[in-house]
Image (cartoon, helix red, strand yellow):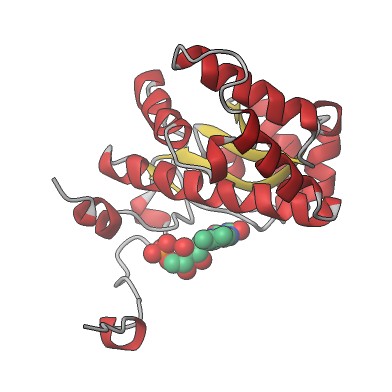
Amino acid sequence: MSIIPALQWRYATKKMNGEKVSQQNINSILESARLAPTSSGLQPFEMIVISNQALKEKIKPLAYNQSQITDCSHLIVFAAWNHYSIDRINHYFDHYEKERDLPKGFSEGYKNGVTKQLTAMTLERQFEHAARQVYIALGMALTEAGALEVDSIPMEGFVNHELDLLLDLEAKGLKSVVIMPVGYRDAENDWQAEQKKVRKTSEDMITFIE
Ligand SMILES: Cc1cc2nc3c(=O)[nH]c(=O)nc-3n(C[C@H](O)[C@H](O)[C@H](O)COP(=O)(O)O)c2cc1C
């Protein structure tokens, strides 16, 4: 099974038709992001899934009035940890040891190394590190949506700190990174719908060293 057909089918949909995506498909898209690999397995992000139309209306002006915000079925907000705390790292390793039936403290050496490395960075760099993990999950979610023939858009075109305020993300120690409207294309009114996919050639992007 290859994901190439899904990647060819998907495109950054500009106009959606308001049709609802089934909970089963939403769950699969979220599950693909939950299963994404992350640095040291810490999964330093959360996803907020918004289907409330009134809230989507409030978000639209924060996203430069992009119509997909209100015409989508669900809006997924990917929000990363604003920093790596010792509590957060401890919580992960406790969970890891429990899930694998390991004696408590089994991961102490590795955990101390990870904690030292991450907390030595400035808070800004810590957030950037966490945000990089988000993009791996975003890629998985976009691909799974494509495989299910559900449309979606990766979106950075929004005012992060205003969305953080609206969703009260600071209280959870989170900052928004990227948002992903999910729904169905309005093919007749979407100028992008039938356009050729534009990508660099393989020759321009790939070097084989044998
Ligand atoms: C990180 C990121 C941010 C993006 N932000 C927006 C956005 O705010 N609005 C939008 O319509 N498209 C956005 N895009 C979509 C890109 O413009 C689009 O993926 C790219 O032009 C390739 O086209 P395709 O995805 O249709 O194949 C974004 C894509 C990425 C990966």
Q: Position of residue 153 (x, y in %)?
A: 49, 51
Quadrant, the C terminus: bottom left
Q: Position of residue 84 (x, y in %)?
A: 76, 39
Numbered label tally: 0
Residue that protrudes farthest toward the left in the picture: 1
Q: Residue at x 29, y 64 (%)?
A: 194
Vertical arrangement, residue 83 with respect to residue 65, above or below: above
- In-image side of 187 versus 70 (left or right): left
**Residue at 44% across, 57% down:** 12
Q: Position of residue 28 (x, y in %)?
A: 36, 28
- For the residue pair 174 and 130, the one nearer the viewer reads as 130
Can the viewer see residue 73? yes
Q: Residue 191: tell me if it is visible.
A: no
Which quadrant: the N terminus? top left
Q: Is residue 161 above or below residue 183?
A: below
Residue occupying the point 47% across, 15% down: 99
| Percent of width and height locating residue 136 | 49, 49
Snapshot quadrant of residue 168: top right
Q: Along the line of sight, which residue is nearer the eye, 40 or 162?
A: 40
Query: Is residue 107 shown left or right of residue 91?
Result: left
Residue at 81 percent across and 52 percent down: it is 120
**Image position of 19 (left or right of 42):** left
